[in-house]
Structures are given as C-alpha cells and as structure tokens.
Amino acid sequence: MNRNLASKRRSSTGGGRDEALDDSGLRELVGYQLKRADLAMQKLFAQEIGEPFQLRQIEFSVLVLLACNERLTHKRVSAALGVAPSNMVSVMSALEARGLVIRRRNPTDGRSSFWQITEAGATLEHRAVLAVRAMEMTRFGIKDEQARRDLAGSLDSLWASE
C-alpha cells in the first residue's frame, strides 16, 4: 500500500457529517469511476431520453439491436443484453404493444419466431440514437465524433473479453 495513502487513511478521524469526506482512494480506482459514470448515465438517460421518448434503457437497447439486425430471436436478444429470457418477455410485449417491434413466425421453422423492428420503431430508434449521441457529447465533454468512438471502443474492450 502506498505510504502516503496509508497515512492519509490513518489520519482521518471519520468524524461527523460536517467534515469533508476523503474519497480519493476510491476515485483512483477505475472500477469505482465506471460505476459512478454508469449511475450518472442512467440518470441522464432517464431525463433526456427516457422521458421525452418514453423509453427505458432496456427498450432503447432492444430497438438499437433490432435496427442493426434484420431479425433476432428472443433468445439472441436476451443473450446480447445479458437479460434472462423470462425477464425480456414484458420488455418485448411492451414494445410490441406500442407498435415498435413485431413478432414473426420463422418461415423455415413454424415452431419458432423472431423479432423485427417496425417502421415506427426504426424512426424512434434513429431519433433516440441521435439524442443519445448528442447527450454523450455535451454532458460528458466529448470534443468530437472520433473521441466518442475512441471512448466507446476503450470501454468495449473492458468487457468484450469476458
């Protein structure tokens, strides 16, 4: 352990609520910073995307996946988002009820089906993605599109290898 950090921790009185809290030990940890960034992103998303577009983050993610893929099975959507298939049922049902996605029978296997985005869903997805990108640029101080792509790529590398 770093001696300065250790002595800083020992010198703290841990006193009352009026004393400044030293969280520098946490702030130098990447995992902590990622968690804080996630919490900030969730709050911003709810305010700037969720309310205006009436989309939860999971619904937005489904629309983006379906906009990038012609059709996906329920199982593939669930796996891609790391959500149990049983938990995706209500998400997909809500999107279907709004006319944003449609379930189609698989023409080669009548026992299975797949999801497709509708025209209304594609329009909403496009508008929401533009709003998310603008939010990321302004709220996170990203200077240009290349910097945004670089940051997304760096973050992707953190979990892509798991």
Image (cartoon, helix red, strand yellow):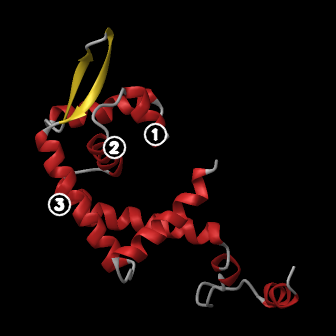
Q: What is the secondary structure assignment of the residue under circle 2?
A: helix
Amino acid type, callout 3: Pro
Q: Closest to the observer: 30 or 161? A: 161
User: For the residues marked 2 and 3, what is the alpha-carbon distance in whole angstroms?
Assistant: 20 Å
Q: Residue at x 23, y 35 (%)?
A: 94
Do the residues under discs 2 and 3 have CB atoms within 8 angstroms? no
Q: Position of residue 87 (x, y in %)?
A: 41, 32
Do the residues under discs 1 and 2 have CB atoms within 8 angstroms? yes
Identify residue for label 1.
Answer: 80
Q: Quadrant where the N terminus lies?
A: bottom right
* CA neighbours of label 2 inside 10 A, class few (<14), some (14 to 19), many (20+): many
Q: What is the secondary structure assignment of the residue under circle 3?
A: helix
Q: Closest to the observer: 86 or 158? A: 158
Left or right relative to 86: residue 48:
left
User: For the residues marked 1 and 2, what is the alpha-carbon distance in whole angstroms?
Assistant: 9 Å
Q: Closest to the observer: 34 or 76? A: 76
Identify residue for label 2.
Answer: 65
User: For the residues marked 3 and 1, what is the alpha-carbon distance in whole angstroms?
Assistant: 26 Å
First-in-chain label (3 vs 1) = 3
